[in-house]
Amino acid sequence: MMDEAISLLRDLAAKLGQTVEELWPHAVRYQAVSALTWIVVWTAVFLAIGALVLSHRKQSYWINDETPSAKFIFTVLFFFALIAWIGVMGTNLPIVLEPTGYTVTGILRRAQ
């Protein structure tokens, strides 16, 4: 499996005028940085919405029987941000922890 990935990467490196040894660290680092960026951005969004919920904690959920308050809106956004954050973490945390394996499987997937 690794030999096939290296062979495909060698072909790509030849097209770019570089060696596999030069190209490989960049490919692995790109995967890790890209995944970490998604984690950082969604963690910031999740924490910002959480701070908004906390800042409105004394407010009731409804202004009157038909009008939701900011607390209600931020709580709903917080719930959706939590779901998105869990998805982002589940998808990207393994890439950050093992970018080499993810890069190899990505190359092999594209080769098929």
Image (tube, helix red, strand yellow):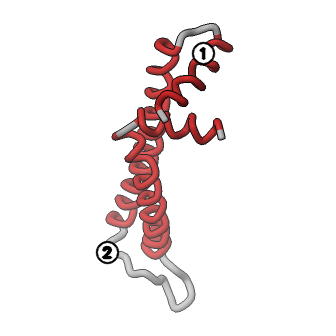
Pick the front one: 53 or 56: 53
Q: Quadrant of residue 108?
A: top right
- 70 displayed left or right of 94: right
> Residue 15, percent across and down?
68, 14
In the displayed structure, would residue 68 be above or below residue 17?
Answer: below
Q: Earlier in the sequence, mark 1 or mark 2?
A: 1
* Image height of 13 relative to 90, above or below: above
Give the farthest residue toward the bottom: 65
Q: Give the side of residue 46 with respect to residue 73, left or right.
A: left
- Quarter of the image with the C terminus is top right
Q: In which image quadrant can residue 107 be found?
A: top right
Horizontal relation, residue 79 to residue 14: left or right:
left
Q: Residue at x 46, y 83 (%)?
A: 62
Q: Is residue 82 above or below residue 17?
A: below
Name the foreground residue: 7 vs 22: 7
Which residue lies at the image location 46% right of the left edge and 58% below the top edge? 87
- Going by the numbered disc 1, the residue's amino acid type is Ala
Q: Give how far across and how far down residue 42 sits, in percent.
A: 45, 50
Q: What is the x, y in percent for residue 89?
A: 40, 53
Judging from the image, what secondary structure is the residue with disc 1 in?
helix
In the picture, the disc for residue 27 is none
Q: Residue at x 34, y 40 (%)?
A: 97
Label 2: element kind: loop
User: In this rendering, is residue 31 above or below 78?
Assistant: above
The amino acid type found where label 2 is placed reads Lys
Which of the numbered marks, if any, corresponds to residue 13? 1
Say the numbered circle drawn on residue 58: 2
Mark 1–mark 2 Cα distance, whole angstroms, equals 59 Å
Q: Residues within 10 Å of mark 2 (few under 14, many from 20)?
A: few
Q: Nearer the viewer, residue 37 or 102?
A: 102
